[in-house]
Image (cartoon, rainbow, N blue to C red):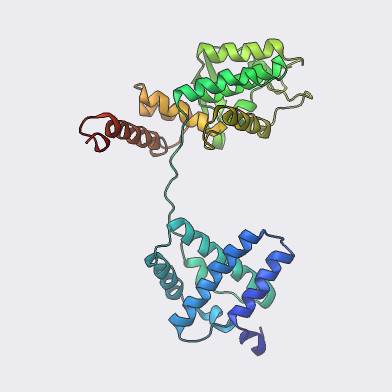
Amino acid sequence: MDASQRSLSATDALSAFLGHLAGERRLSARTLEAYRRDLEGFIGFLAGHEGCVPDLALLTRLKAASFRAYMAARRRNGLSARSLARALSAIRTFYGYLDRRWQVSNAALPLIEAPKLPRSKPKPVSEQAARDLLEEATHLDRPDWVEARDCAVIALMYGCGLRISEALSLTGAERRLGDSLRITGKGGKTRLVPVIAPVREAVEQYASLAPFDLEAEGPLFRGVRGGALGARTVQKTIADLRDRLGLPATTTPHALRHSFATHLLANGGDLRAIQELLGHASLSTTQIYADVETRRLLDLYDRTHPRGRSGR
């Protein structure tokens, strides 16, 4: 970077960066506005914190303390951890562009850690909603075998706690389920999942109606042309069902797995056993379902007990 480049203002560099995002990467107007807002805020902070108009030379020599001061200032202004993480990501992307175009880098930036984001709470569907999904899947005016297939996949996700990828990984060799099913999940971790009678019956019904030869080595669940059923098709089916039933947008295939765990816990299931059924490596991951159930019970108490807030 020569002397003339070192004196290029950070604002002009930002304009070039936004032009690159719009022209070459074709990002949406909303995304561009988010980048502009975050980076203008960063440059404006530097002007006051460093006492000068920021240029490329300043961006190169910034210390870790300056980045941390910026993040602390945004936090004091009420920025959430998620928004702060997004702003830091925008700064990193900006520096990546500066490095490619003007060889501007900063050794301190990789040392800055993004704020820890709160773990999102699972949003299970109710027991009645799960039953309604299975029932409504038989009323979509589709071929009988397709309706039976959709019911079987939903039953596996809700009745066995399978991820959508796990349900769709079953082969024709598993068309006749026994009392348990061996599943290989994330990280190659294998677990044994009990199969309740309604799930077995749903899969058997589909297999008896499927117009394809469900050979042992091939996929159990098929699309209308005979190929492997894709996750997007299942996601769209669930979206159609929730629209017909008036269920919230959080009603997704993965929400059925959440529902499996939450409903087991609500009916006396042991947290350690649920951990094994879900294939979680750590009990702390499963603990979140206990938190959800506890919150639900407290809400129920608050709504219905004579001395609850709503009953006062």
Q: Where does residue 257 sit, x and y in percent of width and height?
A: 50, 29
Q: Using the rendered image of the protein, determine whether residue 150 is visible from the camera's viewpoint.
A: yes
Q: Position of residue 201 (x, y in %)?
A: 58, 11
Most extreme residue toward the bottom is 3
Q: Position of residue 247 (x, y in %)?
A: 52, 31
- Residue 264, above or below 296: above
Q: Residue at x 38, y 39 (%)?
A: 284
Nearer the observer, 56 or 126: 126
Screen quadrant of the N terminus? bottom right
Task: Please report the residue visible at 37 percent of the width from the left and 26 percent of the height from the top.
Answer: 265
Q: x and y percent of residue 121 in the render?
A: 43, 41
Q: Quadrant of residue 103?
A: bottom right
In the displayed image of the protein, which residue is found farthest to the right?
Answer: 225
Pick out the residue farthest to the front: 312
- Residue 159 visible to an observer of this rendering: no
Instruction: Using the rendered view, name the quadrant where residue 165 is placed.
Output: top right
| Image quarter in which the C terminus is found | top left
Tell whether 240 sits left or right of 131: right
How many marks the image carries: the answer is 0
Would residue 186 be found to the left or right of residue 288 on screen?
right
| Residue shown at the point (38%, 35%) measured from the top left | 292
Nearer the observer, 157 or 110: 157
